[in-house]
Image (spheres, rainbow, N blue to C red):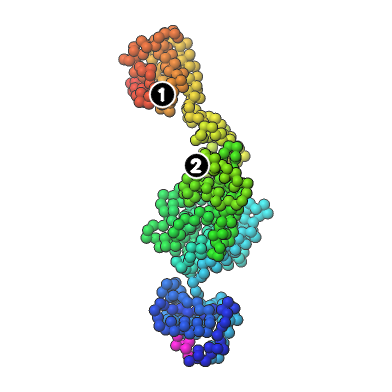
Amino acid sequence: MIFQHLKGALMVENKSNMKGRVTVYSVPGCPHCTQAKAALKKLGLPVCEVDINKHRELQTKVKRLAGCSSVPQIFFNNVYVGNNEDLQNLDPQQLEHLVLLVREEPVPPDAPPVPERASDVSEAMRNLILKLYSDHLSEDGKTVDYKAVRRSPYYEQYCELAVQLQRVELLSLSREEKLAFFINIYNALVIHGNLRLGFPKTLWQRYRFFNYVSYLIGGEVFTLQDIENGVLRGNRRGTAQFLKPFSKNDPRLRVALHDVEPLIHFALNCGAKGCPPIRTYTPQDINNQLRAAAEAFLENDDSFMIDSMRREVKLSPIFKWYKADFGGTDEKLLNWVFDHIGPSQKKLSLKALLSAGNVKPDDPTVSARISACLSDISLWMKDHHLQLNLAKTELLVIPSDPKIHHNFSIQLGSSTITSSRTARNPGVVIDDQLNFTDQVASTTRSCRFILYNIRKIRPFLSEHATQVLVQALVLSRLDYCNALLAGLPACTTKPLQMIQNAAARVVFNEPKRAHVTPLFIKLQHSAPGLQDHHWFGTPLSSFTNADLCTSQMLTLCK
């Protein structure tokens, strides 16, 4: 046998010094494939075995290179040797030449295709896209020259790397390899999508961006939503999603992590201002890399800050969007933060607050998100030939705890809208404590003014005409949104009861001090809308009187 003759002379002692590659295309259970691989291993050569049944996308290319579809097919770098019989029949000089070729020459570009190593491809793509991004970023760091990026030769290299993703073998990846691979791919895909399509500005554009921008990986399509919520979060529903990314029969479900890894949220960068910085991750020591990213993220005051005086913890919106990943409750969330923040004054302050209990988590980005929402509304209105009137736009904050005072503003263009104690929603004044004292005061003032004018012309009106005017007052003012007043204390609704009493006196032209009970009894048959002077007490009687007044009014209008 040739291998016995050359065993001592050609045995490679250190495979790591080999620059090239021996590629063997085979199928499981093939005796000829087994013999060929055993012979190559005796020579100490680095064998790259490719299961042609598992990677059917390579069958056509291998058949074109080898001229047949049988196995095994053996290549030394880009040199085709043949099958097992051809390998066994090589003379010593040919074999020595091939071994030296693999030892000294790197794998050429025209070498036969093999399934790509996921970690190598993702790391190369991550580094290349970052170079493109940084090379064409403006000096102020706010804009990217997308046209120049697409003209760059590095962009063509990146697109070629992206095509190689379809040959990546995903099912054989370990948990650590999946984390590194998909984090790098996610961050690369976000930048690639921004370069091709531009940065999404509206909510609808962001929805389409994260649900349609995708790569073909291992023969399956993965969108940004699929990578984050399907793979890295263990197939959990994302923000504003009703369904899980992968169904039970979806082949991509086999790639998903078994359990969610909260640390991924400090490695993924979706392009928002509050996202963590972009880094490249490797499978080796991935857990420590992610923990270091989380620690650095929590050190930033924009991401995590403690107000000891108010006993508030202000966190990045990431913790709100993915609260379930951090335990699902405020207490578990804050304990998670405590466990992952580095030694610092923040950690000591958080420990003191947790020990004392009753910590109030807060979200420092509420104003920014409201501003973004208002901007989207303004853009939508412009598209439909409408205009948002900022002069009549009011901001009302209703705290869960009346003792907490939220003092912030929202920005729309050059205009700033500050929070106020009350806001008017067509005809109703809503206050931040929801006690409706301002609404009652406003209704009382307008009704008093109208009754004053009716009383001035009362000598010239018949009793029936006065009833019509007063019923119109009840319908348009007293009954308007009166269901909001149900359950309020009598002291709050007393001014409205006094208005109703005054209205009854105006109908019968009685003096201001006249007793109203006989007047309401008299109105039972003539004006049902004014018959019950206790209708402010319960929601049922409130709706009942509104219905009676409406019925009476329709009758009068016929």
- In the image, is residue 393 above or below residue 189? above
- Residue 140: image x %, image y %? 67, 52
For this rendering, which residue is in front, 61 or 438? 438
- Residue 216: image x %, image y %? 47, 64
Label 2 packing within 10 angstroms: few (<14), some (14-19), many (20+): few
Residue 541 in view of the camera: yes
Amino acid type assigned to the residue bearing label 2 in the image: His
- In the image, is residue 203 above or below residue 43? above
Q: Which residue is mark 1?
A: 479
Direction left: furthest residue: 525
Q: Which residue is mark 2?
A: 384
Q: CA distance from mark 2 to mark 1?
A: 35 Å
For this rendering, which residue is in front, 135 or 245? 245
Residue 557 in view of the camera: no
> Please, what secondary structure does the residue beneath circle 1 have?
loop
Amino acid type assigned to the residue bearing label 1 in the image: Asp
- Residue 49: image x %, image y %? 47, 77
- Residue 344: image x %, image y %? 62, 49
Looking at the image, which residue is at 63% across and 51% down? 142
Q: Earlier in the sequence, mark 2 or mark 1?
A: 2
* Mark nearer the viewer, 2 or 1: 1
For this rendering, which residue is in front, 76 or 492? 492
Residue 86 lies in magenta, yes or no? yes
Looking at the image, which residue is at 45% across and 19% down? 494
Q: How many marks?
A: 2
- In the image, is residue 465 above or below residue 545? above
Looking at the image, which residue is at 57% across and 82% down? 13
**Residue 55 marker:** none
- Residue range highlighted in magenta: 84-90
Helix, strand or loop for the magenta stretch, by majority: helix
